[in-house]
Amino acid sequence: MRVIFMGTPDFSVPVLEALHAAHDVVCVYCQPPRPAGRGKKERPTPVHARALELGLIVRHPERLKSAEEHEAFAALKADVAVVVAYGLILPQIILDSPKYGCLNIHASLLPRWRGAAPIHRAVMAGDAETGVCIMQMEAGLDTGPVVLCTRTPIGKAETTGDVHDRLSQIGAGLIGQALAQLPDLVPTPQPEEGVTYAAKISKTEARIDWAEPADLVARKINGLSPFPGAWCETPAGRLKLLNAVARAGSGAPGTVLGGLQVACGDGAIDILKAQREGKRPMTAEDLLRGIDLPVGSVFT
C-alpha cells in the first residue's frame, strides 16, 4: 500500500518502522524541529530523525490549513494515512484525501480516555487494563469508529513509561493487521456510554500531597513517571519520585517510617525508584546509600 505516516514522538517510531518494512511509505509528516538542550539548537523529533535514517521523505508543516498543503497531500495519492501522536488537527479535506481515509492508533480502550494523555490518565486512575484502538478518523476528538482493538493489563507497580513502551509495540503490530484486512474491516461506532477525556498533563499536578490516600499517591507517582515526574521536598533536598507501591502503614502524612516507606493520609507507600536533582534515577536501596533520611524525617 501507498501509506502516508503522521507522527512525532518516540511512541510513534515503532509504528513507522513496521510500516516501512511492509509498505511503501510515500511521505512522513511530523512536528517541526524545536529548540532543545542547553544550546537551544533545533532538534528534529524522534519520528523525523528515524525517517531520515530510513531514507524517507519528511514534511513538517506548522499547520495543514493552506490550499498548498492540501494539494501536496493529495498529490501523494496515498491509499491510507496512519496517524499516531502527530500533534496537529487534520482538516476534513485531509481526512478525505486517501483512498481508505486516515487511521489513528490511539493508546486507550475507546471511548475511555479520548484526548492528549491517555496512558498517564489510565495509570493515574488505577485502571486494571488499557489497550490500543485503531480508529477511522473523523472531525471529532477521538470520536471515530473503531476497526480493531486489543487489551493489556496494567500492573500495580507499572509506570506510564512501562505501559507506553508496551502499547507502542502493540500498536505497531495491530496497524499491520488493520492494513492487511483494510478493505474488509467493518468500523464499529464508539458507544455513547463510558466517555472520558484524558486532559494534557500539567506540571502543577506533579507535587505530592501526602495527606491523600496511599493508593492515590502511588498511582500519581507511577502515572507521572518518567515525565513530568511527581516530586516532593525532603530534608535531603527535592526528590523526583519515579515508582511506588501502596502498602499498609500508619503515621503522620509525609513521615518516613523506615527506608523509603512514607506514611500517607491512609496507609503508606514504598518508594521503589527516585531521583535527586542533578543525579540519575536510582533504586531506593542505592539512593539511601548517598543520603540520610532516618525514621521520622518528614517529606512535604
Image (spheres, helix red, strand yellow):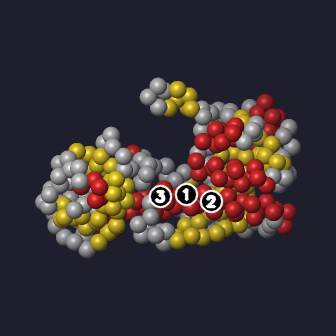
Q: Is residue 6 above or below residue 181?
A: above
Q: Is residue 51 above or below residue 140?
A: above
Callouts 1 and 3 close, C-beta under 8 Å: no
Q: Earlier in the sequence, mark 3 or mark 2?
A: 3
State how far apart marks 3 and 2 are (Cα): 14 Å
Q: Nearer the viewer, residue 239 or 99?
A: 239
Q: Quickly name the residue at label 2.
A: 169
Q: Quickly name the residue at label 1.
A: 165
> How would you rate the neighbour count of disc 3 (Cα within 10 Å): few for under 14, some for 14-19, many for 20 or more?
many
Can you give x and y, in whole percent of width and height, for residue 192 in the image? 62, 67
Q: Nearer the viewer, residue 16 or 221?
A: 16
Callouts 1 and 2 close, C-beta under 8 Å: yes
Element on which disc 3 rests: helix
State how far apart marks 1 and 3 are (Cα): 9 Å
Q: Quadrant of residue 277?
A: top left
Q: Which mark is residue 100?
A: none
Q: Earlier in the sequence, mark 1 or mark 3?
A: 3
State how far apart marks 1 and 2 are (Cα): 7 Å
Q: Nearer the viewer, residue 234 or 122?
A: 234
Residue drawn at (29%, 49%), measured in percent from left and top?
Answer: 239
Residue kind at label 2, given as amino acid type? Gln
Q: Is residue 25 above or below residue 267?
A: above
Residue drawn at (49%, 27%), measured in percent from left and top?
Answer: 40
Residue drawn at (19%, 70%), measured in percent from left and top?
Answer: 250
Residue drawn at (70%, 63%), measured in percent from left and top?
Answer: 174
Q: Is residue 101 left or right of residue 166?
A: right
Q: Quickly name the residue at label 3.
A: 160
Residue kind at label 3, given as amino acid type? Thr
Residue kind at label 1, given as amino acid type? Asp
Can you give x and y, in whole percent of width and height, for residue 208 in the image? 30, 54
